[in-house]
Image (cartoon, rainbow, N blue to C red):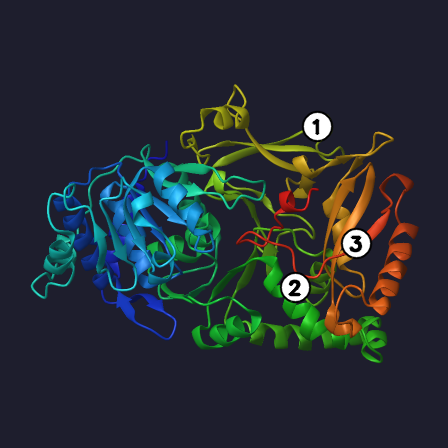
Amino acid sequence: MIKDNYVQYFETSIRDNWELNALSDYKGKTLTYGQIGRHILAMHQIYHKMGLKPGDKIAVVGGNTVNWGIVFLSAITYGAVIVPILPDFHSEDIQHIVNHSDAVLLFISQYHYDLIDEEKMPALLGLVKLEDFSVLFEQKKLVKSSLSRLFSEYLYSSDFKPTPGELIFPKISNELLAAIVYTSGTTGLSKGVMLSHNCMLANLLYARENMPLKRGNSILSFLPLAHAYGCAFEFLFPFTLGCHVTFLGKIPSPKVIVKAFNEVKPELILSVPLIIEKIYRKQLKPVISKEPMKTLLSLPLINSVIGAKINKKLSAAFGNNFRELVLGGAAFSPEVENFMRKIKFPYTIGYGMTECGPLISYASWKTTKQASVGKVVDWLEIKVDSPEPDKVIGEVLVRGESLMDGYYKNEKATQETFTADGWMHTGDLGLIDKDGFIFLTGRKKNMILGPSGHNIYPEELEARLNNMPYILESLVIERDSKLIALVYPDFVSTGAEDIKDQQIIKLMDENLKKINEKLPAYSKISAIELIPEEFVKTPTNKVKRYLYAK
């Protein structure tokens, strides 16, 4: 157990940065640290008057907003357990999570409220509108005092003006549960990951020691706050330093994000690889793959000059003020990474999972190795279940301070995840070199055992396919003992209107021939099947493979 207290970091930051801007909605309201502190104390009074006890569950669903942040902070500093729900979950999933988590209070956006049925969540004392904290529904027979009156009396009272010295949060032990995070379900039904204050503190301390941020810096938060990655490093970590966090609150298309980057000018950027891959494929690749640029880039001296110019232009797209771009949540295209290394772009790749709150490994862009996901963080041990971890692929296992407490109300899944001596199965396959750098090769459950006994990693084949012309996305599956590549083609580049167009079929036949020429016999692809729409993905842009495993 870590000696420092998790909640104390938020109390100290609010006190020390009272007059600084804390949280903003993009093109909307801004609250200072003092105003955030006032809201949190008011929420604590409301929870107390409602009869909520430490350990009770408070759920929240909606886009990234200042009010979402207030709900999260008020819950964990009260001693309640926050249940963040991903906003793209179906209404039935939201209702299931609320019921399964035993939540007694739900903060919900108007959009999501219109989709759900409160009668199907009978344990809720009330539902509160996330946009303005107005009460949408309350179980009057169950709450000790009218929720509408409580919110009016405490949250909107002009008489409630605490000073920094009056900001005192309850003393909450690190061993207690802080959050239940329901996974996005890449393999089917989601599970509630139980994260303690200690787990979340381990992530916070590592970030404060190793990531390039300081008091007064700006951050643009656009990853889902209900996902552990975005919540920990775009919100909670910067907040404890006295940074100014702006919540995008919009669908993060490259066009929208680039505009916001240039207005907010963040000092640190966290992203999923898909964002930078789209920028590369739509803006850079069409330029660098044509003559004479292609020839010029092959000349070392000219290549360095052109690379510097591209680097400068790409940096400008991200606001031209950041020290590092940290990618995580999904695999990074080898082609795009190779180009980013060539032009010396300041990116790095981290590795994590919700069950670790989430960080497992990281290294700064100046120290990391190409294709690696960094080195294990301070609070964890790591090993590869292999006779030669640097040469023979094996499953990655971790152990230490930032591991989850288990899956909520799912003891069977919890026991299957941990070994008797405390190591947690990540389900990821990889290698660790002599310097401690981790290289992931795929998911254990995705590995295909070929007819000849060879291990086939579909992610490696997909990386090759995605680098081929006219292919935007791919997914390799096994069907009748054959490898089939499902492909979402680039309709714009081919000029085709649908997947039945003979021109696009011919181009894919050529791609199939070319890729098989470079593959060993045991991993050759039998056929390419075109699909008309992008693959269904999780919020971190992992394809939901189970939907296509037929």
Q: Mark 3 or 1 closer to N-term?
A: 1
Query: Is label 3 in a helix, a strand or a loop?
Result: strand
From what the image shows, is residue 423 above or below residue 99? above
Disc 1 marks a residue whose amino acid type is Ser
- Judging by the rendered image, the residue that carries numbered circle 2 is 277
Q: Amino acid at mark 2?
A: Glu
Give the label on residue 386, or none.
1
Q: Is residue 320 visible?
A: no
- In this rendering, would 356 be left or right of 58? right
* Mark 1–mark 2 CB contact (< 8 Å): no
**Is tag 3's residue or tag 2's residue first in the polypeptide sequence?**
2
In the drawing, does residue 100 fall left or right of residue 450?
Answer: left
Assess whether mark 2 and mark 3 are in contact (beta carbons under 8 angstroms). Answer: no
Residue beneath disc 3: 529
Foreground residue among 116 and 436 = 116
Task: Report whether residue 238 is seen.
Answer: yes
